[in-house]
Amino acid sequence: MSVGTAPAGGPRVPGEGVPWEGLPVCVAGVGVSGRAAARVLAGLGAAVTAVDVRDDDATRAEAARLEGDRVTVQLGAGAAGSPPAGTELVVTSPGWRPTSPLLLEAERLGVPVWGEVELAWRLRPGGPDAAPWLAVTGTNGKTTTVGMLAAILRAAGLRASEAGNIGTPLVEVVRADPAPDVLAVELSSFQLHWSSSLRALAAVCLNVAPDHLDWHGGLDAYAADKAKVYAGVVRACVYPVDQARCEAMVREADVAEGAVAVGVTLGAPAAGQLGVVEGLLLDRAFGEDRHRSAVELAGVEDVRPAGTHNVGNALAAAALARAAGVPAEAVSAGLRAYVPGGHRISQVAVVRGVAYVDDSKATNGHAAAASLTAYPSVVWVAGGLAKGATFDDVVRQAAPRLRAAVLLGSDRALLAEALARHAPDVPVVEVAVTDTGAMDEVVHRAAALARPGDTVLLAPACASMDMFADYAARGEAFAAAVRRLDAAGTA
């Protein structure tokens, strides 16, 4: 691959009087979002070169399909050291770290680097008149909140699409025909890092807890990227009132004239907030007389999956929908229609008086802590890739409700050390097996430690990729092992 050089006369910014036709663009990564970006750009006439450090059979097959769509593809470590000569724009996949050689070289050359989300925002047909975005970020709860939000929007009769860090890539959604009326957009910290012009109609950061610190380089940098969700918000910045860091993000955000701050709380709402009173979700932010009365939105029983943290997610979804003008009655209808995704506090079975619950989606300590609070006596199944996190806080909080812990995965020692410090009387079993039989051993060891009335809870507090393709595969392995245990007990 030729060494990158700055384009003659300096880089141009496409979409600002610069045509896409013939524009040399480098797409970094040929994963789902990279492939979507490459195809859309090639369809606009750009001269697209997609690069990826991977060079395995699956990646080569994807490359061949891209080349059929007029995309040049270069694979292997040598392809990702520098943008191709003359590149005027780099579109990066979210997994590529800012310290990747190609991205650092693009910065040195003065070549703009966009993420797929930034590209999607700039490609919206109709510009300011395009379908508004309702944006959701946070360490935990994003997917659930976006799902609830989309269900509420649809209950209001709107054509709503879920996109971003979930489902169809945004760059495809914004160019769909017919166009959606509104987008419920899940945004990861990676995607926000590479976004600069996004201006949501309303946005929420649900929470901030240590996660992906290896990618961002520290908690402050991670939080700063999350805070970008509020930049330029048009109507409402939604935040949980118990999250001081999120509230500070809202105070510091540079927003559009007339945008308001809307708090959500699990307690009684003040004016300008949504909250809960006697089992009812109430709105004192968007009603006609918010200073003296509240609008009833739904009952706590309408929220699924159950749990206080999901009530908070429902309030955030309701606030975003109300900011978009959705009527109150659509909130309860949407929440009742919402079908939770898999591996989120999902009971697999009750075996000999012990409940087995799959919350494999709890991929960091903050999510695991929320899950642990739902059960009084737990055999905790945890471990995997820590992603630079530590576990003292979650163990300290959970210690009184832990019957035992069964640990697996490459960073299980970090959990074992935190348990030894903060829950020294809790029995801990480490499972060193990493092959396909590992989860059977985990479940059997957990079953031996549990007593009737206990919950064996898979809430790993870690990512899954050390042993499994993703969190879903890990949850499916756990559920399958539980079913085998149940079958063996009833045979």
Image: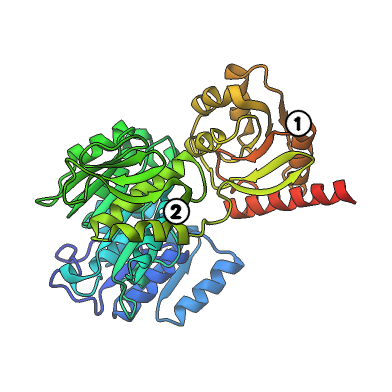
385 versus 34 height, above or below: above
Q: Amino acid at mark 1?
A: Arg
Horizontal and vertical percent position of residue 476: 66, 54
- In the figure, is residue 340 to the left or right of 27? right
Q: Secondary structure at mark 2?
A: helix
Horizontal and vertical percent position of residue 232: 17, 52
270 versus 12 height, above or below: above
Which numbered tag is attached to residue 143? 2
- In the figure, is residue 221 to the left or right of 426? left
Q: Residue furthest right?
A: 491
Residue 89 appears in view: no
Count residues near mark 1 (Cα–Cα under 10 Å), then give few for <14, some for 14-19, many for 20+: some
Q: Give the CA separation, mark 2 to mark 1.
A: 33 Å
Residue 58 falls in image quadrant: bottom right
The answer to whether the residues at label 2 and label 1 have Cβ atoms under 8 Å apart is no
Q: Quadrant of the N terminus?
A: bottom left
Labels 2, 1: front one: 1
226 versus 143 height, above or below: above
Q: How many marks?
A: 2
Q: Amino acid at mark 2?
A: Thr
Q: Residue furthest left?
A: 257
Horizontal and vertical percent position of residue 300: 44, 46
Given residues 266 and 121, the one toward you in this image is 266
Q: Give the residue drawn at x 30%, y 47%.
A: 204
Which numbered tag is attached to residue 451? 1
Horizontal and vertical percent position of residue 15: 18, 70
Q: Give the residue drawn at x 31%, y 35%.
A: 268
Which numbered tag is attached to residue 236? none
Residue 206 appears in view: yes
Q: Give the residue drawn at x 43%, y 67%.
A: 168
